[in-house]
């Protein structure tokens, strides 16, 4: 049979055996290694780039400065205004960590995005949730913050109770969940897409060598697309973090 | 026919129906966001064509709009795996 594809179950594609401290909550597997690698690379990137601090940037320093510049002008000034520049280090780190965690999806022999397991996006979303709520409470006080979420000016009196309920649930519960699921599901979908096309290409290559041309070409194209998705998801996560913090600290008009 | 199948192999019928349900969940969840992303991108292109100097700002906002819209499809995608 030509297309007797044996697609592996989902667990074979995203679950990896732990090889260190197995059976404990601190077990280490491939995803954990990728996460550590992303964190260490983020640190090393900025540490090496910032060590010399020459006035005319070259090489790595140039790259790091363009990342910081992008976070400044492309994210913070667009969403929070100049008073949001306090958050630039946090947002830069988050952007680089997510991007490096994502890009391991297409790096040969690793090919597993760290963010395709729920734990890492969820933890990042919890950090963001704590950040924007803390900012809002410090700015407006606990009751003032709740009031600014639930009773913004300009809502007609008739729909106020309904609006307050929806706004509360949406801002406090749905936001972090949607933030985490957006990153997680995008990376999982990309990983599954690449795995599907790789399996298809392999099976067709074994059966009819010529038949693998079309899925093989698509696999290459999709790999390029996944690089784009990695950057885009890191950008969207950072941008939404900035927007949420900006919304929490804005004063009412 | 389902009764016959159920009498022969109840586990397989259940697994099959779960798979069908998961497919319906994802298909249904993709309809709305599909239309929504179309609206977002279409209007963003109109805006960029009318005012090319604002293209950078429009593009950023467009990606934000896409991210908010596609979240619903992604919930369906995750639910597909939870149902399996």
Image: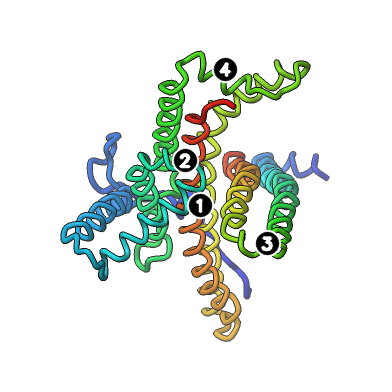
Report x, y in % for residue A43. 24, 52
- Tell us which disc is closer to us: 3 or 4: 3
Question: In the picture, residue A109 is in which quadrant?
Answer: bottom left
Residue B51 circle label? 3
Q: Chain of mark 2?
A: A
- Tell us which disc is closer to us: 3 or 1: 3
Asked if labels 4 and 1 touch by Cβ distance under 8 angstroms, the answer is no
Q: Secondary structure at mark 2?
A: helix
Query: With A70 as the anchor, is B33 left or right in this view?
Result: right
- Tell us which disc is closer to us: 4 or 2: 4
**Label 4 to label 2: alpha-carbon separation:** 21 Å
Q: Chain of mark 3?
A: B
**Label 1 to label 2: alpha-carbon separation:** 21 Å
Q: How is the image coloured?
A: rainbow
User: Residue at image x 58%, y 66%?
Assistant: A5
Residue A4 visible? The answer is: yes
User: Residue at image x 70%, y 52%?
Assistant: B40
Asked if labels 2 and 3 touch by Cβ distance under 8 angstroms, the answer is no
| Label 2 Cα crowd, 10 Å radius (few <14 / some 14-19 / many 20+) | many
**Label 3 to label 1: alpha-carbon separation:** 37 Å
Residue picked out by circle 4:
A147
Q: Secondary structure at mark 3?
A: loop
User: Residue at image x 67%, y 45%?
Assistant: B22
Residue picked out by circle 1:
A188
Indicate the quadrant containing the C terminus of chain A: top left, top right, bottom left or bottom right: top right
């Amino acid at each position: 049979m030509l297309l007797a594809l044996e697609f592996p179950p989902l667990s074979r594609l995203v679950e990896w055996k732990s090889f260190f401290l197995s059976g404990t909550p601190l077990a280490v597997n491939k995803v954990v290694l990728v996460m550590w690698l992303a964190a260490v690379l983020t640190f090393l990137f900025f540490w090496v780039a910032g060590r010399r601090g020459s006035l005319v940037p070259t090489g790595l320093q140039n790259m790091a400065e363009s990342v910081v510049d992008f976070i400044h002008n492309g994210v913070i000034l667009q969403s929070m205004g100049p008073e949001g520049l306090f958050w630039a280090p946090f947002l830069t780190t988050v952007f680089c960590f997510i991007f490096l965690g994502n890009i391991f999806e297409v790096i040969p022999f690793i090919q597993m995005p760290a963010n395709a397991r729920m734990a890492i996006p969820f933890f990042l979303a919890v950090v963001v949730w704590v950040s924007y709520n803390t900012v809002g409470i410090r700015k407006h006080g606990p009751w003032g913050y709740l009031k600014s979420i639930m009773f913004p000016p300009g809502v007609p009196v008739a729909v106020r109770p309904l609006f307050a309920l929806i706004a509360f649930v949406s801002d406090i519960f749905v936001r972090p969940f949607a933030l985490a699921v957006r990153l997680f599901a995008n990376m999982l979908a990309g990983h599954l897409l690449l795995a599907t096309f790789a399996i298809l290409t392999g099976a067709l290559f074994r059966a009819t060598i010529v038949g693998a041309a079309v899925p093989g070409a698509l696999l290459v194209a999709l790999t390029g697309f996944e690089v784009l998705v990695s950057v885009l998801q890191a950008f969207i996560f950072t941008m939404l973090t900035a927007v949420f913090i900006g919304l929490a600290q804005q004063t009412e008009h | 026919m389902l009764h016959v199948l159920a009498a022969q192999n109840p586990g397989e019928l259940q697994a099959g129906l779960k798979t069908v349900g998961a497919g319906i969940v994802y298909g249904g969840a993709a309809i709305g966001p599909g239309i929504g992303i179309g609206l977002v991108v279409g209007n963003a292109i109109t805006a960029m064509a009318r005012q090319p100097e604002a293209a950078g700002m429009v593009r950023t906002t467009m990606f934000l709009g896409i991210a908010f819209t596609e979240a619903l499809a992604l919930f369906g995608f995750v639910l597909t795996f939870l149902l399996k």
